[in-house]
Image (tube, grey):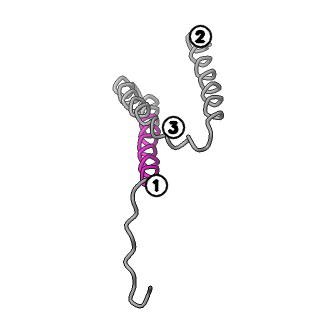
Amino acid sequence: MSADLMFDLTVFVLSLLVGFEVISKVPATLHTPLMSGANSIHGIVLVGAMLIASTARGPAGYVLAFVAMAFATANVVGGYVVTDRMLGMFRARTPQPRKDGES
């Protein structure tokens, strides 16, 4: 294994551990705002995946680029869905019209 690959794997594993530790300390009431704030990061990941895809060579590179863009797109769309649901909780509800005979 090359030193560069070992360094990259070490950084990846450490970032997973730090990310898990940080997220596990967030109270449940803050998870939704945290997800909506992360949308910009997911957008940057999508742009990065597209840039990497432009340098892909061979079938393995194309498959990895497609998988990276699919996951990044799922993150962006999911983040916007969660944000929309969160903002929906704060919208004013319209009163329901009364049916005949109800007081």
Question: Could you tell me residue 87's position as x and y percent?
Answer: 42, 50
Question: For numbered disc 2, what is the local secondary structure?
Answer: loop
**Residue position for label 1:** 89
Q: Name the residue under label 2.
A: 2
Look at label 1 and name its amino acid. Answer: Met
Query: CA gap, disc 2 to disc 3?
Result: 37 Å
Q: In this view, does 94 lie above or below 57?
A: below
User: Magenta region: which residues?
Assistant: 68-89
User: Crowdedness of circle 1 by 10 Å Cα count: few (<14), some, many (20+)?
Assistant: few
> Seen from this angle, which residue lies furthest front?
103
Kindly identify the amino acid type of the residue bearing the numbered disc 2: Ser
Instruction: Give the percent coordinates (x, y) of residue 21.
Output: 65, 29
Q: Earlier in the sequence, mark 1 or mark 3?
A: 3
Estimate the x, y position of residue 60 in percent, counting from the top left: 46, 30
Residue drawn at the location 45% of the way across and 43% of the way down: 79
The span from disc 1 to disc 3 (Cα, nearest Å) is 16 Å
Residue at image point 45% right, 52% down: 85
Res. 72 image quadrant? top left
* Figure quadrant of residue 1: top right
> Is 36 one of the magenta-colored residues?
no
Quadrant of the frame with the C terminus? bottom left
Q: Distance between the residues labelled 1 and 2?
A: 51 Å
Q: Which amino acid does label 3 sit on?
A: Leu
Location of mark 3 (residue): 34
Position above or below: 8 against 75: above
Callout 2 crowding tier (Cα within 10 Å): few <14, some 14–19, many ≥20: few
Q: Is mark 3 on a helix, strand or loop?
A: helix
